[in-house]
Amino acid sequence: MINDLNWRYATKKFDYSKKVSKQDLEDLLEVLRLSPSSFGLQPWKFIVVKNEALRQEIRKNSWDQPQVTDASDLIVLCSLKTMDRDVVKKFINTIAETWKVSPESLAGYEQKMLGSIKAKSPEEISNWMKRQVYIALGMLLSACAQKKIDACPMEGFIPKKVDEILGLEAQGLESVVMCPIGYRASDDSYAVLKKVRLDKSKVLIER
């Protein structure tokens, strides 16, 4: 695992001719689906942008970064715009169906979730949901490294524009972070640079 993490880097130049296999992509999407989240609420959706015209439009709103169009696949990680009683109720029903129990038996857990949500402002809820999306991103990056698939987490885009391009508002979603995946180009100069990380003594603290 450590070797895999040393191997990975935020790939700046992808080889357009090399594509991630269907099975590998399905595996990575399953990693996203299985990612942990607060209360297990999964306040997200993950969009694989296949349409080349859409990717070109997204690139125009991502400061013309070539990863958006040149990588094998572009994944846009989104959060829900709102978290309310209906979302919680649907989740409770999913738990009940999965565990073969009654929704009523989960009333205590349901109230715990609702209480936590009620205690937060709309802005706090939005930020909380976006933090969950970053947990999923971390899982994706680790899985890519293990498969020797390159990836580049990107915040360098205009979220409102990307939301418009993908029609996210109508779906109750907003874009949080993008992650092109694929294979590094042989002439990506960043690929040969030594990874720059602070020494353990500067980031690990014992108490």
Image: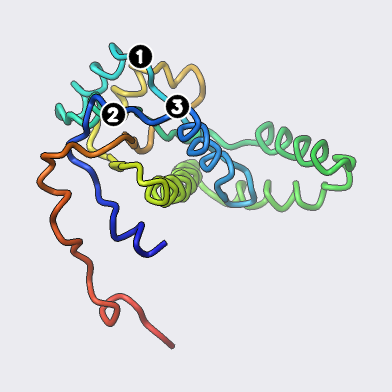
Q: Which residue is mark 2?
A: 18
Badge 2: few (under 14), some or many (20 or more) residues near its Cα, within 10 Å? some
Q: Where 174 falls versus 42 (above or below)?
A: above
Q: At 47% across and 46% down in the image, what residue appears?
A: 136
Residue 17 quadrant: top left
Specify whether residue 127 is in view.
no
Q: Which residue is mark 3?
A: 47
Residue 64 on image: x %, y %: 15, 27
Residue 54 on image: x %, y %: 31, 15
In the rendered structure, which amino acid carries the disc numbered 2? Lys
In the image: residue 100, left or right of residue 44: right
In the rendered structure, which amino acid carries the disc numbered 3? Ile
Q: At 22% across and 23% down in the image, what residue appears?
A: 59
- Marks 3 and 2 sit apart, C-alpha to C-alpha, by 21 Å
Q: At 43% across and 21% down in the image, what residue appears?
A: 168
Q: Where 155 falls versus 68 (above or below)?
A: below
Specify whether residue 19 is in view.
yes
Tell me which label, 1 or 2, sits earlier in the chain: 2
- Mark 1 and mark 2 in contact? Answer it, CB < 8 Å: no
Q: At 38% across and 18% down in the image, what residue appears?
A: 50
Q: Which residue is mark 1?
A: 51
Badge 3: few (under 14), some or many (20 or more) residues near its Cα, within 10 Å? some
Badge 1: few (under 14), some or many (20 or more) residues near its Cα, within 10 Å? few
Pick the quarter of the image with the N terminus.
bottom left
In the image: residue 79, left or right of residue 4: right
Pick the quarter of the image with the C terminus.
bottom left
Residue 140 on image: x %, y %: 43, 45
Task: Looking at the picture, tell me which residue is in the foreground, 194 or 175.
Answer: 194
Look at discs 3 and 2 and give the one toward the viewer.
2
